Image (cartoon, rainbow, N blue to C red):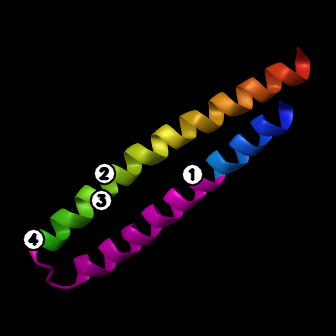
Amino acid sequence: MKNKAIRRLIKAKNALQTTLSRILDINKQKKILSDIQTPPELYSKIHNELKLLNKMAEKQAKLVQIFEHKLNEKQTG
């Protein structure tokens, strides 16, 4: 049972890391695009994608906290 909790924690951390990496990449693109003239629809698309990724990252971070908490309870209890 402990191994399953560890696997879930690792998967959640990996998913969070991937999402955060994607957010950073999009922010870099956004900065580059702000230096040149960008069509409003492209800027809107980037904004919406960032909004979605931020929500995903928030949920994934909560999952990581839950899994870490459960794992700590199993180790102490």
Name the side, left or right, on which 59 lies relative to 45. right
Tell me: residue 28, above or below residue 18.
below
**Label annotation for residue 49:** 3
N-term-proximal mark, 2 vs 1 = 1
- Picture quarter with the C terminus: top right
Farthest-out residue, bottom? 36
Residue at image mark 2? 51
Residue at image mark 4? 40
Tell me: residue 41, above or below residue 18.
below
Amino acid, disc 2: Lys
Give coordinates of residue 37: x percent, y percent.
Answer: 14, 83
Per the rendered image, the range of residues in magenta is 14-40
Amino acid, disc 3: Glu
Tell me: residue 14, above or below residue 22.
above
Label 1 neighbour load within 10 Å: few <14, some 14-19, many 20+ = many
Q: Residue at x 78, y 37 (%)?
A: 4
Residue nearest the viewer, comparing 2 with 76: 2
Amino acid, disc 1: Leu
Amino acid, disc 4: Pro
Q: Residue at x 72, y 25 (%)?
A: 69
Give coordinates of residue 75: x percent, y percent.
Answer: 89, 24
Pointers 4 and 1 in contact (C-beta within 8 Å): no
Tell me: residue 75, above or below residue 13.
above
Q: Give me the C-alpha separation between circle 4 and circle 3.
A: 14 Å
Residue at image mark 1? 16
N-term-proximal mark, 4 vs 3 = 4
Farthest-out residue, left? 40
Image quadrant assignment for residue 26: bottom left
Q: Residue at x 30, y 72 (%)?
A: 30
